[in-house]
Structure formats: structure tokens, C-alpha cells
Amino acid sequence: MWRHIVSNFLTVLIVLLVAVGGLVAWAQKQYEEPGPLARAVCLKVEPGASFARVSEELRAQGAISSAYIFRAGADYAKKSGDLKFGSYLIEPEATMQGIVEQITSGGPSTCGTELNYRIGVTGQQLILRELDPATGDYVEQAKFDPKTETPPEGFAEAAGKADVRLRVTVAEGATSWQIVEALKSADFLQGEIKTVPAEGSLAPESYEMKRGSDRNALIAEMEKRQAAIIAAAWEGRASGLPYSTPEEALVMASLVEKETGITEERTRVASVFVNRIEQGMKLQTDPAVIYGVTKGQGVLGRGLRQSELRRETPYNTYVVAGLPPTPICNPGRAAIEAALHPDSTPYLFFVADGSGGHVFSETLEEHNRNVAKWRALEKAAPADSTNN
């Protein structure tokens, strides 16, 4: 009898163990396999939030099938105590294992609200926008110039939240003085910038920031990136260029940057300057003359005067032959590549075509005709605008 009881007990125990093993295997499969999420969602983890609360939020958003399995997996991986606050973009079919790794590793928020401080050539803007996880597009919430405009209602509260992503974006063609002056107005940064970096030494790119980051550390990162860009481009440069150092190439890139913002024109503009140097012609580029007038400190805001075009300064390329002594702005990667890989063309001249681009020519006679067309368009523009 006892033998029979023991036998039955062992049988039940084995069945239970098999069932438990199967349950564990099923739970592990649920934890590691692609999840049920069909469209990306933004998970906001508030400071002080518990893992239990986050797991329920994920289940409510349809990102996981079981809050219990999610918590059990995190406990087993010893990550349930590592929850980091922030906003996380949860991709479609994300695994529970991947989500746990994502929300416990921390780092910059990947969705939610972003505050982008954009430093341009003519000014700066604070842009507050929200990521739509379903489309991956940012929806603009507010935009204004912090130096000249009052923040819209509710801006301070929205921009001050702990999980807001902070970004500084520098436009191609901004001068070092303009960048430094704009950074002084970024109240989410700290630290005094005592000297303006060398012209051309700052990379016009987008920089992820943290609230309270040091301005000088950001400047150092800009310099580091620009140095790496010019070094790599110089290493792979075309042969036969009329400049012998990376510094001269950077000067050329700055001229190209200020002459055109159209991508496909940059290598053509560079070819004109190269051709003129090789033929002993003066570069005759207005942006360089303007830099000699403003020293890069702001926008001229008017046309050049004849006296300025005749005055001999190191940057007056109508009077002085060759390249200016320094860059006239901070050129972007594309302009640097164009300066070091110019097109092979016969062009010696170019002028605006009235549509935002330029028309190129080989001879002075052809160029003069193009200039006459451009001046006619300039004269007609005010009349056209009054008729609209």
C-alpha cells in the first residue's frame, strides 16, 4: 500500500515538475520573443517610478503581453533596481528583454519632447517639438528667438521637464563669434567662454546635450569634430589642388559655404575658385569682403559699398590675390568635401540666377550678360511683389 502511495506521489511530482518546467520555458519564450506591439509608442518613466508601475504601463500600451513575466525577467536578470527615468521609444515587436535593457541602461531620451537650440547665420531659435512615435516625425510645438522674442505661454513648463531632450544645432556658415554669442544665451548651459575659437574650427552639426553642460566642453567637442572632418577629407583629397595645407583647404571650404547653400553647386563653385587661382585671377568673392568689414561679428545687412570693394584689406579678394588669411565662417562637411574634390570645369565666373542658384560661365562676355539678366531681375522684384 505504502509502495503504491509513494509511487503515485512520485508520479504526481514528476508531472508537476514537467509542468513547471514547461511553464518556465513558455515564460522565457514570451520574454525573449518579439512582442505584440504593432506601432511604436513612447514610454515615459517618471523620476521615482517603480518597476511594477512601468510594467503595467507597458501592458496598457500593448507593448508586452504580461506584466508579471516582464517583472520576473527583470528580477532574474537583476535589473529591476536599475530603472532610469526618461522617455523611451519602444519599437514595434520589441522583446521584453530588449525593453528591460533599454529602460535600465539610461542615456538620452529617445522620444517625447525635444528642445533644439538652433544657431543660424542670421540669428538663433529655440524650437520645442514632440516626437510622434507612430510616424517617427517631430511635431513643432513652439519656436522663437530667445534674444528678441518672448517665450509663448506654457513654454517654460514644457521645456523644463526632466526628460526633455536638449540639443544644440549649428548651421553651416555661422561664424565662431556668432556661435559663441548664441551659446551665451542658452540658459540650459553653464560656464563662461572667455575667447572666441579660431574661425572655421567649429563643426556645424547637431549636439546632444544635458542640462547644465559646460559651454567650453561643447566648444571643445565642436573643435574635435571639425578637426577630424578636415583631417579625413584632406587624407582623401584629389590631386593637383592649388592649396598645400589643410588650413588652406578650410579657407576654400568657407568661401564655398558662403557662396552657395545648394548641395549640387558646391563642387562647381569650388572649381571656379580653383580655376581662378590656377590662372592667376583674383577670387573676387563678396562674402570674403563682407567678412573683412564685419569681422564675422553679425550680418552686414546691406550691400557692399564701392569704397569697401576698393579698400585694401586681407579679406578683399577684389584687391588681394589668392585666398584670404583665414576661413570666413565655419564650413560644413559637404563644403569641405567640395573644396577637396572640386569638379573639373572650364568655368571662371558665376552669378545668381534669380531662383536661389547660380549660372556659370567661361568667358567675361558671357558672364556680363548673365550679370545684366540678374540685375534686371533684381529691379523687377519690387514691382512684382507689389502686384502679388
Image (cartoon, helix red, strand yellow):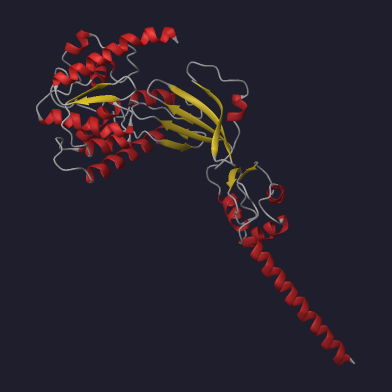
Percent of width and height locating residue 94: 59, 54
From the viewer's perspective, is 301 left or right of 28?
left
Q: How many numbered discs sit on the rendered protein? A: 0
Residue found 61% across the figure and 29% down from its top: 158
From the viewer's perspective, is 278 left or right of 74?
left
Nearest the viewer among 353 and 180 is: 353
Percent of width and height locating residue 42: 62, 43
From the viewer's perspective, is 317 left or right of 194?
left
Nearest the viewer among 367 and 52 is: 367
Q: Quadrant of residue 344?
A: top left
Nearest the viewer among 37 and 364 is: 364
Question: Is 155 located above or below residue 10 in the figure?
Answer: above
Percent of width and height locating residue 257: 29, 29
Residue 195 visible in rendering: no
Residue 156 visible in rendering: yes
Most extreme residue toward the left is 280
Q: Quadrant of residue 322?
A: top left
